């Protein structure tokens, strides 16, 4: 599975960005796509995940109510709509693929993922 994240950039506090993660590979449909982020000098943390059908989603408490994960299976793409951005949202954002069982994890960890895309930098200015 190959993953490509894009959509990062510089935005003022209170603004919005939409990240995209395009997945490819024969076994893509066997994996769950997650979003993580890593602020400078800190550990990579789970942000959101979505089931293959889109019917099940999970969010970290830090982004709940502000971020929305969605997917378009026809385009093999998972999106992360980020609203009401705060300076503390500044980080490199990564999409990752984990096996099917990761959809039931409350807080998946980096070791639960099998594939990673290159990150996209989101900078929120105050």
Image (tube, rainbow, N blue to C red):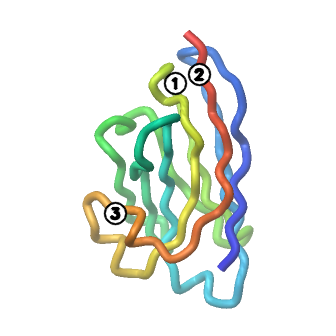
Where the N terminus falls, by quadrant?
Answer: bottom right
Above or below, 59 against 126 in this view is below
Report which quarter residue 13 is drawn in. top right
Report which quarter residue 96 is drawn in. bottom right
Above or below, 83 against 2 in this view is above
Instruction: Please tell me how crowded label 3 is: few (under 14), some (14-19), or many (20+) other residues with Cα within 10 Å.
Output: some
Q: Nearer the viewer, mark 2 or mark 1?
A: 2
Rendered image: mark on residue 7: none
Q: CA distance from mark 2 to mark 1?
A: 7 Å
| Residue 42 placement (x, y as % from top left) | 42, 39
Instruction: Please tell me how crowded label 1 is: few (under 14), some (14-19), or many (20+) other residues with Cα within 10 Å.
Output: many
Instruction: List the residue tagged with mark 2.
Output: 124
Q: CA distance from mark 3 to mark 2?
A: 25 Å
Which badge, 2 or 1, comes first in the chain's sequence? 1
Of 81 and 41, nearer the camera is 41
Q: Residue furthest bottom?
A: 26
Report which quarter residue 12 is drawn in. top right
Q: Are marks 2 and 1 in contact (CB under 8 Å)?
A: yes
Q: Nearer the viewer, mark 3 or mark 1?
A: 3
Instruction: List the residue tagged with mark 1.
Output: 85
Where the C terminus falls, by quadrant?
Answer: top right
Task: Identify the residue at horizontal 65%, vertical 51% (top origin).
Answer: 119
Local SS, label 3? loop
Q: CA distance from mark 3 to mark 1?
A: 23 Å
Above or below, 14 against 44 in this view is above
Local SS, label 2? strand
Instruction: List the residue tagged with mark 3.
Output: 108
């Amino acid at each position: 599975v190959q993953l490509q994240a894009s959509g990062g950039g510089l935005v003022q506090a209170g603004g919005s960005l939409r990240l995209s993660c395009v997945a490819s590979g024969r076994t893509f449909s066997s994996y769950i796509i997650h979003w993580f982020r890593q602020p400078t000098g800190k550990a990579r943390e789970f942000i959101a995940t979505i089931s293959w059908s889109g019917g099940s989603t999970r969010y970290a408490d830090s982004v709940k109510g502000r971020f929305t994960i969605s997917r378009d299976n026809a385009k093999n793409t998972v999106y992360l709509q980020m609203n009401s951005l705060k300076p503390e949202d500044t980080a490199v954002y990564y999409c990752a693929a984990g096996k099917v069982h990761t959809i039931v994890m409350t807080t998946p960890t980096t070791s639960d993922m099998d594939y990673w895309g290159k990150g996209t930098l989101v900078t929120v200015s105050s």
